[in-house]
Image (cartoon, rainbow, N blue to C red):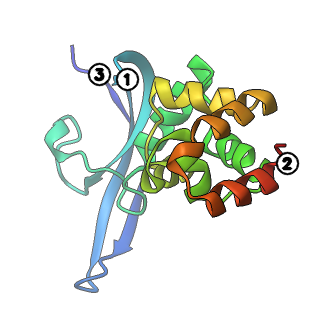
Amino acid sequence: MKPKHHVIKTIEIVRALTGQPARFTVISLDEVVQVRRREIAMTHTYWVPLGDDLDNDENYLEPINDPDFNLQADFREYRRLFGVLTPQAIREIREGYQLSLRQFALILGMSYSTLSEIENGLVLQTDEQERLFRLSQNERAFADLVQAKRAIMSATQYQKIVHKVALT
């Protein structure tokens, strides 16, 4: 049996490229999604062009004003259910050590772009990355991480980081 949608409202937007108005029926739909191979029950929001069949999921569009709306909701629920650090919590760990994204990424052994995407909520960290972030919450463990990466840093990089995180 196909899940039942619920009509929320009808909206009209002006298309950016054409300047023409477009009308949509906004619906919600209870779905079960997989995030990191774990099933999560979610209520998603979709836009359906006005007049199109609301029961045909081929007509469902992600919210045009925020195409990542449902995905971000899935990530938030996954973090809540499984106790995964939020992007803000990760940023606070890094900023607590007064490190740049590049410095923190170097210490954790990940690329700058990956860390940036995680902190901006664009991707969900892997279990391994989550363990590194959790380890970084402990100052002594973080000092050990910094020390372990000393060989791959220039002397200047290492001294800047040691000075910032007050590791001596």
- Disc 3 marks a residue whose amino acid type is Pro
Q: Earlier in the sequence, mark 2 or mark 3?
A: 3
Q: Earlier in the sequence, mark 3 or mark 1?
A: 3
| Mark 3, other Cα within 10 Å: few <14 / some 14–19 / many ≥20 | few
Q: Which residue is mark 2?
A: 166
The one nearer the camera, 7 or 104, is 104
Left or right side of 76 for 117:
left
Is residue 41 visible in the rendered image? The answer is yes
Image quadrant holding the C terminus, namely top right
Q: Which residue is mark 3?
A: 3
Name the element at disc 3: loop
Left or right side of 4 for 77:
right
Mark 3 vs mark 1: in front = 1
Q: Which residue is mark 1?
A: 36
Up/down of 10 relative to 37, above or below: below
The structure residue drawn at horizontal position 29% and vertical position 22%, both measured from the top left corner, is: 3
Q: Which picture quadrant has residue 79?
A: top right
Name the element at disc 1: loop
- Disc 1 marks a residue whose amino acid type is Arg
Left or right side of 160 for 5:
left
Is residue 7 visible in the rendered image? The answer is no
Mark 1 vs mark 2: in front = 2
Image quadrant holding the N terminus, namely top left
Contact check, label 1 and label 2, Cβ < 8 Å: no
Q: Earlier in the sequence, mark 1 or mark 2?
A: 1
Mark 2 vs mark 3: in front = 2
- Disc 2 marks a residue whose amino acid type is Ala
Residue 160 x, y percent position in the rendering: 72, 60
Left or right side of 147 for 153:
left
